[in-house]
């Protein structure tokens, strides 16, 4: 045996036991390296206790803690404070268990070890977090190199370590192991593999899947609860939770020899309990199908911490359910197996081979979304060896992205998750990355690593911080494979009471309506200016033509009356009965869809009258065309109006458009309506894209003073996805590729803002973030549904 101190620890919280290759004699001398195994006595109902105060406080475990009065109740004075004692079982189940307490639980029986192998349950309730906490406790307790090994594996190693092994090992021998755990039992199948050791060949168990749990009240938790209940029933006169601290209660639960026990009440009085020899086992029926799960095994082993008649009763029930021969293993087999694991680990020999639960992600290829496994199928790994994906999942961070998402599935976890990775700053070009898994069997959580060589960076994905998605993995893959591209939300410019009410800046609309209601010459300019104002981001009337709920009825009536007068005024101008400016027309167009229903047709007539031979009364100067085009974009309210306007737009070549006239009108239509995008066919979309590309290119190297409507129109065009699924998506539509390239060139152009004038700097500051969001929308993965509103406000 090794000349280094080795310890195998069966840490289970019910009956802990350690096996070591050294012992300390009565004279304090260490006997190290003896071939025989030194077994510490099993500690029933193990706990850790705190001694001392302040900086001198420390936690102690093992046999010392088992007999200590610490934490046993008020009858022991200050030392009996319950905060001074915690059960090992609690430490193993608490996610926030302090590492120093777990370290104390181990060091009580393993202090001084150079290699320490610790048993872990195979039940699904055992978490990767517990594995990490146990390894941290081994390190904190200075117990040397730590190795966690499944109990089923240790049961087999414990048999193989004996000179009189209970079975004849050979290559490919299939062993079934029934393990006793808190929640019931586990069923595992291990295959023996002949491997080369340092001095001779040896056999190592191979684990190829997780154990099957069998939930039953015959698990340790059920046995302990039943034993305590029976004991309390025998002594009803004694109050408190004395049964929790009783060693004889633990002995009764495991079928060990019970002895009378002296306990103490909170008042300091002692009382004695004399437990029965046995207790009635809980009623339990094993599920059908257990035999099928172990049907191909050459031999079935049973590992339990119980003793005597209780053990025999459990074996009878298992035998009745399985109808196959069972080999009963001694109570110390796991501790012996852990010592053998420590020996093999110390000498570099194979301890066991383990599978890694599959971890998958989703990748996109020519055929769409697909599940991609990050761990080789059927791969098993020697204990303690680091696994790294041989073929990582490869994808790319798109230009302009400052973060990206990764979907993940773990084989033993019910629901998949979505993790977001923050890059820190938008990337200027597409960046290839690779996602791989790095993991050691039974050593905690896998590391999910994303490597980006172009950025000289590595990112680690936080599984625990990822968002859980409650749907089956296959359904999620199918959904993402056919996931529709995001669509910017329809733009609705909100209304509010601020412009209706008087303020320091002047009278509100209610006051202006009242002042003008009886005037012969209405101040249309003042009314139009008020309607076009936007204090606190609110118009008098919303772009859907709605008024704030709190507008008084009298003001509503005055608005209707003045709207009628404005329409008559406009018609008189068209008929040539009066000559005047366009202020009454502005007053009407700034009512958006609340304007008179016939107004869009009147504006369209003025637009169609665009001829050097005829001058429409609305056209007084170049700015009048802005009012006509934008007014039509504001006031269209139905499909007929929208189709007429769209048809009129394309009567003029897009290269001859004005950014404040046709581009603005098209942007208004597509952004504020759910029906206007449906009226566009592919030819119209291509022409609008051509106009957007022209304006983006035209502004490169300028101060961006004419950039108002091009990005607004681009975002409005993306609402064509209401009609054609995944229209204008980069990677699926050539037009989207051109739009994406134009946006990227603009973002790059914004990079010169350090050396430019204030006008350019302001424009770049306003639009740069929105350009990145436009790129996300072009990729079909927009994260800002209010993009149109943000573009309007820019």
Image (cartoon, rainbow, N blue to C red):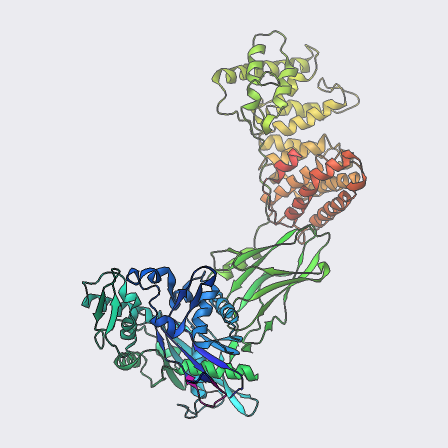
Q: Quadrant of residue 498?
A: top right
Image side of residue 416 versus residue 685, left or right:
left
- Residue 526, picture quadrant: top right
Kindly identify the residue that appears in the image at 19 percent across and 66 percent down.
235
Q: Which residues are magenta?
A: 29-38
The one nearer the camera, 412 or 203, is 203
Pinpoint residue 598: horizontal percent, then vertical percent: 60, 22
Provide the major secondary structure of the magenta segment.
loop
**Visible in this render: residue 282?**
no
751, above or below 322, in the image:
above
| Residue 622 visible | yes
Image vertical order of residue 21 relative to residue 497, above or below: below
* Magenta span contains residue 532: no
Identified at 70% across, 52% down, the residue is 427
The percent coordinates of residue 324 (x first, y second) are 33, 84
Expressed as whole percent of the image width and height from the top left, the position of residue 31 reads 47, 87
Q: Answer left or right for 39 relative to 216.
A: right
């Amino acid at each position: 045996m090794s000349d280094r101190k080795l310890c195998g620890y069966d840490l289970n919280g019910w009956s802990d036991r350690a096996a070591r290759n050294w012992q300390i004699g009565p004279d304090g001398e260490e006997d190290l390296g003896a071939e025989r195994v030194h077994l510490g006595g099993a500690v029933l109902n193990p706990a850790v206790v705190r001694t001392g105060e302040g900086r001198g406080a420390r936690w102690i475990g093992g046999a010392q803690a088992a007999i200590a009065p610490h934490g046993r109740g008020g009858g022991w004075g200050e030392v009996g404070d319950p905060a001074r004692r915690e059960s090992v079982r609690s430490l193993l189940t608490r996610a926030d268990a302090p590492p120093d307490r777990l370290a104390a639980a181990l060091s009580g029986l393993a202090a001084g070890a150079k290699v320490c192998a610790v048993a872990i349950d195979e039940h699904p309730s055992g978490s990767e977090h517990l594995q990490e906490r146990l390894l941290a406790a081994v390190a904190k307790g200075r117990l040397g190199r730590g190795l966690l090994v499944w109990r089923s594996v240790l049961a087999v190693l414990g048999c193989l370590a004996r000179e009189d092994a209970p079975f004849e090992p050979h290559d490919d021998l299939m062993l079934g192991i029934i393990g006793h755990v808190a929640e019931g039992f586990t069923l595992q199948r291990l295959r023996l593999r002949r491997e080369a050791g340092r001095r001779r060949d040896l056999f190592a168990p191979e684990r190829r899947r997780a154990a099957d749990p069998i939930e039953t009240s015959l698990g340790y938790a059920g046995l302990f609860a039943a034993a305590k209940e029976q004991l309390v029933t025998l002594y009803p006169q004694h109050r408190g939770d004395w049964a929790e601290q009783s060693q004889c209660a633990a002995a009764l639960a495991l079928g060990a020899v019970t002895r009378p026990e002296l306990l103490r009440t909170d008042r300091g009085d002692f009382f004695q309990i004399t437990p029965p020899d046995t207790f009635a086992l809980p009623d339990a029926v094993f599920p059908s199908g257990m035999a099928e799960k172990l049907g191909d095994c050459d031999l079935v082993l049973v590992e339990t911490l119980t003793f005597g008649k209780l053990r025999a009763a459990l074996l009878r029930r298992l035998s009745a359910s399985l109808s196959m021969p069972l080999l009963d293993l001694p109570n110390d087999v796991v501790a012996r197996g852990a010592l053998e694991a420590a020996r093999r680990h110390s000498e570099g020999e194979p301890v066991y081979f383990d599978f890694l639960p599959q971890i998958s992600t989703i990748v996109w290829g020519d055929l769409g979304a697909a599940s991609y496994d990050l761990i080789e199928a059927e791969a098993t790994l020697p204990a303690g060896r680091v696994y790294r994906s041989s073929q990582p999942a490869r994808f790319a961070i798109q230009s302009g992205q400052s973060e990206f998402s990764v979907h993940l599935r773990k084989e033993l976890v019910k629901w998949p998750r979505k993790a977001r990775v923050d890059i820190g700053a938008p990337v200027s070009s597409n960046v290839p990355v690779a996602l791989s898994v790095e993991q050691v069997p039974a050593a905690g959580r896998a590391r999910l690593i994303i490597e980006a060589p172009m950025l000289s960076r590595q990112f680690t994905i936080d599984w625990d911080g990822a968002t859980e998605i409650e749907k089956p993995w296959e359904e999620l893959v199918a959904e993402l494979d056919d996931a529709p591209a995001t669509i910017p939300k329809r733009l609705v410019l909100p209304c509010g009471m601020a412009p209706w009410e008087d303020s320091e800046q002047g009278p509100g609309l209610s006051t202006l309506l009242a002042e003008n209601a009886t005037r012969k010459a209405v101040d249309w300019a003042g009314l139009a200016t008020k309607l076009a104002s936007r204090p606190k981001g609110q118009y008098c009337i919303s772009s859907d033509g709605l008024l704030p709920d709190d507008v008084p009825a009298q003001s509503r009536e005055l608005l209707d009356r003045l709207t009628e007068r404005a329409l008559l005024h406009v018609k008189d101008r068209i008929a040539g009965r009066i000559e005047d400016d366009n202020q009454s027309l502005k007053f009407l167009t700034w009512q958006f869809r609340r304007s008179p229903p016939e107004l869009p047709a009147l504006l369209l007539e003025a637009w169609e009258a665009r001829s050097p031979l005829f001058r429409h009364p609305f056209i007084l100067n170049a700015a009048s065309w802005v009012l006509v085009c934008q007014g039509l974009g504001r006031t269209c309210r139905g499909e007929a109006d929208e189709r007429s306007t769209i048809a009129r737009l394309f009567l003029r070549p897009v290269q001859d458009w004005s950014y404040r006239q046709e581009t603005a009108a098209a942007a208004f239509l597509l952004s504020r309506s759910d029906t206007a995008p449906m009226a566009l066919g592919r030819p119209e979309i291509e022409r609008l894209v051509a106009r957007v590309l022209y304006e983006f290119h035209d502004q490169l190297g300028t101060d961006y003073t004419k950039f108002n409507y091009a990005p607004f129109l681009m975002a409005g065009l993306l609402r064509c996805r209401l009609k054609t699924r995944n229209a204008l998506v980069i990677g699926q539509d050539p037009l989207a590729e051109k739009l994406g390239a134009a946006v990227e060139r603009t973002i790059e152009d914004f990079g010169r803002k350090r050396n430019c004038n204030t006008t350019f700097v302001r424009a770049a500051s306003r639009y740069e973030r929105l350009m990145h969001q436009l790129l996300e929308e072009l990729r079909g993965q927009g994260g800002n549904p209010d993009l149109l509103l943000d573009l309007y406000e820019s």
